[in-house]
Structures are given as structure tokens and as C-alpha cells.
Amino acid sequence: MKLRRIAPVVLLCVLAAGCTSGATEGSSSEGQEGAGGTGVEAVTTPEKAREQVVSSLKGKKIAYVPIGQQFDITSLWRSRLERAFEPMGVEFSAPDAAFDTQRMTQILDSLINDKVDMIILQNPDVGVLSEQIARAQQEGIYVIAVNELGNQSPDAYVGADHVTMAADLADRMVSDCQAAGKNKIAIIDGNGTDGTSIATNEGWDPVFEEAGMDVVSTQHSRYDPAVANTIASTVLQKNPDLCGFAVNWDVTAVGVGEAIDAAGLKGKVGVYNIDASGTWCDALDKGIVTAGAAYDAAGIGTAAAMFAQQLFLLGNAPGTSHTVSFVPYTIVDESNVGTTSTACYGKS
């Protein structure tokens, strides 16, 4: 079944949040003094426009808090943010949550108490940071979420369209399985309660169901490649005739591929996943993974910096408007990975 596809690059309001331009009850514009207010003037010059942008950002405290700083993708976002903010006079910080949700919550509470001007975060669970996001906005702090959208809407979200990518990836997986005369598959997601896990399952579940795929296992890797490897090894012992694994992150997909290789099933059991970093491309070269959705990971960091500039320049009170933006992607395998610019980031 082909799901209705949506455009890969969109900007839309999160309807549940009720997009408005006026202040809402409980919100505050405290901390936004010096912001541009209504954007650049209708009649301006390049010099004046830059002056307004820089003045709206200069001296602002912006903190970047991903789930962990040690991954190709999160370090890539940090690099893009630093490059964008440095010439603007921003006080930029990047505390490391080290993949610890409790620590991340503590970091956000501290940043809110310190009255930073903006927090750019990666949400590890759809509900766990809702209180912090809402409180930050009430305290006059803008919140931008990257690649993980929770229940509490930030001022802006930018990331991959995991629902549509997963559906496209499932279509590819189904085609390969049908060609091989197989119908058993397994799913390995992240935490299960994070936005990416929920979105990917919403994307590929209907495709697998419509195609009559037999999903023999659905388990959570906690985004740990070692856990994913152990899960895959157990699934393969029980299902040596498996067609393939659907995995929602490339780092864990490599762990799955290594389990397949160790079981002597490389080339017989496929690995289909979201994301395509340099580490994943190395695994593709070795035949350990099969196909992936390569989205514009670098573009997410750049777009987050652009959203930051826009929010400060327009000067609307935090929490009064909410936007979502998706970056483009391509399904890649060994046939087209070399010509896909969004694949293999971080590869030297």
C-alpha cells in the first residue's frame, strides 16, 4: 500500500496548540527586551537588515541540550549552531545530558532558573519534558525542538518527517521481501515513548499490515547498538527465515547488521533504517545494512539557528505561536548513496 505522501519540506502550525500572534494567558515577554519586535523594516538595506538581526541576538543566552553530545548527528547540530551564533554575539552553551533523561530534566530546570533566553533541545520522551517546556515559555524563554517532537509544543520544531520516511522505507522493505518470497519481519525502535519511535511506527505499521507482513517481534533498543545487537541475535535464533529488520536509527541498525553477520545471514536478512550517517555508510559498504532514509541532518542544525534568528527578530512572546518544519530526505542504498548529498555526514 502506498500511503498519501506529504511534501518533504513544509512549515505549518501545530493545530492543537492554536497558532496565534498575541500573548496568551500565563506567557511572558520578560527577557526579550531588545528583540526586533516586528522584523525588519518594510523598506531597508542589507546593512540595516543585518544590524537589526545582530542587535536582536547580541548578548542573548542560548543553550543547546540534545539527548547526548557524543553522536555524529548531535555534534553536527552543535557545529552548525555555533557557526551561526558566533558572529551574532550570542552566549552559546551546550551542557551534556549524556543520554540520561533525569539529568536532562535537571539541566533544563537549571537553565530556566538562570533565565536563559532560548533553549534548543532534543526531546527524549513525548511527555517527560512537557513541564519544563511549558515553564520555560511562561518564563519568557523560547524553546526550539530538533528532530524529536513531544506533547508540549515548542515555539518551533525542525527535523525529519519520520512518519513519511518510515512509510517509504516500509514500501521498499515490502518490495524486497516479496521479491525474496518472505514475509517475516521484526521491528526495533528506540525508547518506544519518544517522538521518533512513535512516528516511525505510525508510518510503517499500516504498510506492513496492508502487505500482510508477519511482524514476529517489536522491541525497544533504547538507542543502544549493543542492546539492538542482542535483540537481533535472539530474534534470528527463533526466526532464521526472517526477511529483515525495520530500525528507527542508523546507529542501532549497525548493531543489528553486525548480529546478522555473526549469525552467518548477511545478504539473506536485510536492515532498513532511518538516518544515514558516515558510520552507517561504512556499514553499507560492508553489506551490513541494506537501505536507509537519508534526511538533511545538517540542515536541521542550520534551520534551528534560522528559527532562533526569526524568533528574536519578530519578538513575539514565547509560547504564543508554534511551527513545525520538515527537512527533505531520500531513500538510499548502494545504488545511489554516492550521489545523495544528505547521506554519509560525518564521514572523513
Image (cartoon, helix red, strand yellow):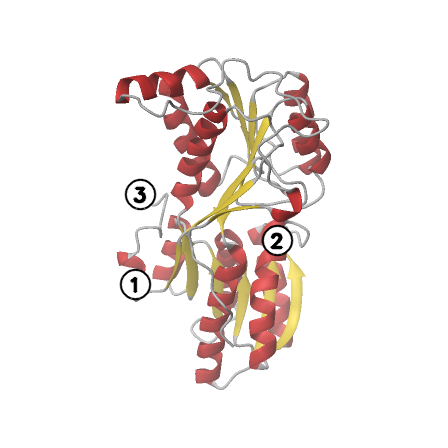
Q: Amino acid at mark 3?
A: Ser
Q: Nearer the viewer, residue 46 or 207?
A: 46
Q: Amino acid at mark 1?
A: Asn
Please tell me which residue is depicted at 66% across the width and 27% down the height of the picture: 136
Badge 3 element: loop
Badge 2 element: loop
Please tell me which residue is depicted at 46% across the width and 76% down the height of the picture: 268
**Mark 2 or 3, which is nearer the eye?**
2
Q: Is residue 38 above or below residue 98?
A: above
For the question of whether residue 42 can be seen, the reply is yes
Q: Which circle's residue, 2 or 3, is located before the other in the chain?
A: 2
Please tell me which residue is depicted at 63% across the width and 62% down the height of the picture: 231
Counting from the top left corner in percent of width and height, residue 225 is at 55, 52
Task: Report the quarter where the C terminus lies.
Answer: top left
Q: Sort mark 1 into few (<14), some (14-19) or many (20+) by Cα contacts within 10 Å.
A: few
Residue bearing mark 1: 336
Give the number of the disc on residue 190. 2
Counting from the top left corner in percent of width and height, residue 74 is at 48, 38
For the question of whether residue 241 can be seen, the reply is no
> Image quadrant of residue 19?
top right
Q: Which circle's residue, 2 or 1, is located before the other in the chain?
A: 2
- Label pair 2/3, CB-CB below 8 angstroms: no
Cα–Cα span, label 2 and label 3: 27 Å
- Label pair 1/3, CB-CB below 8 angstroms: no
Residue bearing mark 3: 348
Cα–Cα span, label 2 and label 1: 27 Å
Cα–Cα span, label 1 and label 3: 19 Å
Please tell me which residue is depicted at 57% across the width and 74% down the height of the picture: 208
Q: Amino acid at mark 2?
A: Gly
296 lies left or right of 18: left
